[in-house]
Amino acid sequence: MKIRHVTLRAGKLDSLSGLIDPASHLNWDYPDHKVTTCVITEKFSVGAPIRFSGQGLSFAIVNRSSFTHYGSIDYTQRLASMIDAVKEKKKENAKHLAVGAPAKTRHQDD
């Protein structure tokens, strides 16, 4: 089973993040954040169509056997760590793009 946080727009997958963290989403010991249903898309890629049924969006129910006891977690700390990791990744990507960008030339009119 693969589950991701995504945004949907106009019947398609608009953006997606990494796979969910089972310790927070599939944890019997942390019921406030557990995932129980998921919207079904054709595939995990931006632009992929969402599946629809006669009633609207198609959903999958997460099987109870997917859950386990991971113990107590500090969700606030985990969230802060994730945000820091995303910021660091953005910095790395920006450096990579800057290194690969062509040098700007200065024109007489500048």
Image (tube, grey):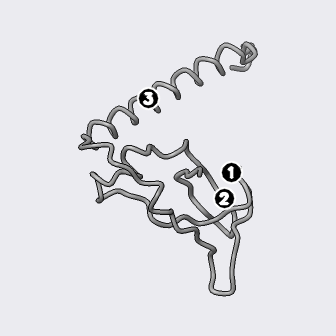
Please provide percent x and percent y for residue 110: 68, 20
The residue shown at (52%, 26%) is: 89
Element on which disc 2 rests: strand
- Alpha-carbon neighbours of circle 3 within 10 Å: few (<14), some, or many (≥20)? few
Q: Splitting the image into 4 quarters, where does residue 59 fall?
A: bottom right
* Residue 80 found in image quarter: top left
Dot in front, 3 or 1: 1
Above or below, comparing residue 33 to residue 20 in the picture? below
Residues at discs 2 and 1 in contact (Cβ within 8 Å): yes
Residue 92 or 23: which is nearer the viewer?
Answer: 23
Residue type pointed to by label 3: Ala
CA gap, disc 2 to disc 1?
Answer: 8 Å
Q: Between tags 2 and 1, which lies in front?
A: 1
How many numbered marks appear?
3
Answer few, some or many: residues within 10 Å of disc 1's Cα (few below 14, many 20 plus, some between 14 and 19).
Answer: some
Residue 56 x, y percent position in the rendering: 63, 81
Image coordinates of residue 77 in percent, x first then y, are 27, 36
Residue with the mark numbered 3: 85
Q: Secondary structure at mark 3?
A: helix
| Residue on which the image places disc 1 | 44
Mark 3 or mark 1: which comes first in sequence? Answer: 1
Q: Amino acid at mark 1?
A: Phe
Name the element at disc 1: loop
Residue drawn at x 59%, y 52% as measured from the top left? 1
Residue corresponding to mark 2: 13
